[in-house]
Amino acid sequence: MANKKTILSEEIELSEIVLKKTNQAFEMIKQEDIVCMKKTHTRGKKMFKTQAAVIAGVCILAVSSISAVAAIHHY
């Protein structure tokens, strides 16, 4: 365990080429346009679809039950 602590606490020296490339990459990132994504409010639409599906299921169940009871009563 002590060996891992000494390895992680040592300073690392990077070569000039690596530093140059990382600095170029950071500059490219800074020059790019910052784009913010807008949060779409789809919760209301999702809730409506869920409620509509539940209502449709209940209606289908009710109609099929009434049809079954009517068929049994008829015969």
Image: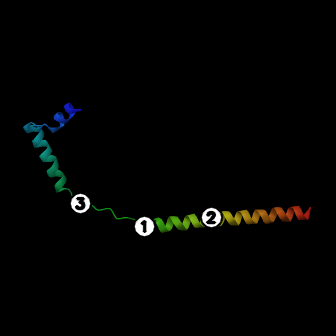
Find residue 27 and report its horizontal and vertical position in percent.
14, 51
**Residues tagged 2 and 1 counted as in contact (Cβ below 8 A):** no
Relative to 23, say whether 75 is above or below. below
Q: Residue at x 51, y 64 (%)?
A: 46
Residue 54 lies left or right of residue 70; in this view the side is left
Q: Residue furthest toward the right?
A: 75
Q: Residue at x 19, y 31 (%)?
A: 3
Q: Residue furthest toward the top?
A: 3
Identify the residue under disc 3. Answer: 34
Residue 68 lies left or right of residue 55; in this view the side is right
Q: Residue at x 71, y 63 (%)?
A: 60
**Residues tagged 3 and 1 counted as in contact (Cβ below 8 A):** no
Would you identify the image quadrant in which residue 71 lies? bottom right
Q: Earlier in the sequence, mark 3 or mark 1?
A: 3
Split into 4 quadrants, where in the image is the N terminus?
top left
Using a 10 Å C-alpha cutoff, classify the residue at mark 1 as few (fewer than 14 neighbours), some (14 to 19) or many (20 or more): few
Q: Earlier in the sequence, mark 2 or mark 1?
A: 1
What amino acid is labelled 2 in the image?
Answer: Val
Would you identify the image quadrant in which residue 62 lies? bottom right
Q: Earlier in the sequence, mark 3 or mark 2?
A: 3
Find residue 68 and report its horizontal and vertical position in percent.
82, 61
Identify the residue under disc 2. Answer: 54
Q: At numbered mark 1, what does the secondary structure look like: helix, strand or loop?
A: loop
* Image mark for residue 41: 1
Tell me how the rendering is colored: rainbow
